[in-house]
Amino acid sequence: MADFIDVVFFPLGTLFLGGYVGYQFRILTDRRKEFNEALIPLRDALVKTEAISETMIANIEVKLGKRAKVIKNTYEHEFLPKMSHTNFIKY
C-alpha cells in the first residue's frame, strides 16, 4: 500500500502543486505588465519634464483600479506640494 501511495499520489500531488505555483507566477507577471503599461504616459511626461495633469492620474486610476492608490497618494501628497513651490504646474 505504501508503494502505491509513493507511485501514484506523490507525483500527482507535485504535479498539481507545480501547476498552481506556475499559475500564480503567471498572474503576478501579467499584473506587473499591466501596471507598467498603464504608467508609460506618466513616465514619458516625467522624462520630458512635462506637466503632469489630474487627467493623467485619473486615467491610470481607471486602468489599475485599487492598485493606483499608491500612485495617487504620491501625486497628491508629494508631487503637487513640491511642484507648487517651483511653479512648474500652473493652474
Image: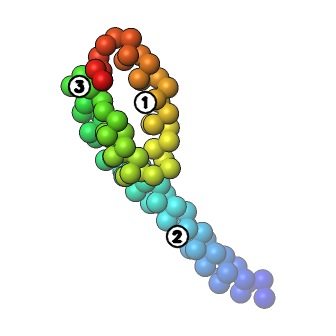
Circle 3 crowding by C-alpha within 10 Å: few under 14, some 14–19, many from 20: few
| Disc 2 + disc 1, Cβ < 8 Å | no
Q: Which amino acid is tagged 1?
A: Tyr
Q: Which mark is residue 19?
A: 2
Q: Residue at x 45, y 36 (%)?
A: 72
Q: Residue at x 38, y 51 (%)?
A: 62
| Disc 2 + disc 3, Cβ < 8 Å | no
C-alpha separation, residue under disc 2 versus residue under disc 3? 45 Å
Q: Mark 2 or mark 3: which comes first in sequence?
A: 2
| Disc 1 + disc 3, Cβ < 8 Å | no
Q: Which mark is residue 50?
A: 3
Q: Which amino acid is tagged 2?
A: Gly
Residue 59 percent across, percent down from the top left: 33, 46
Q: Residue furthest front?
A: 91
Location of mark 1 (residue): 75
Q: Which amino acid is tagged 3?
A: Glu
Q: Residue at x 48, y 47 (%)?
A: 67
Q: Judge depth for marks 2 and 3 and give the one in front.
A: 3
Residue 55 percent across, percent down from the top left: 31, 40
Q: Is residue 84 left or right of residue 9?
A: left
Circle 2 crowding by C-alpha within 10 Å: few under 14, some 14–19, many from 20: few
Q: Mark 1 or mark 3: which comes first in sequence?
A: 3
| Disc 1, SS | helix
Q: Up-down: is 55 above or below 34?
A: above
Q: Is residue 36 visible?
A: no
Residue 68 percent across, percent down from the top left: 45, 44
Q: Nearer the viewer, residue 5 or 15?
A: 15
| Disc 2, SS | helix
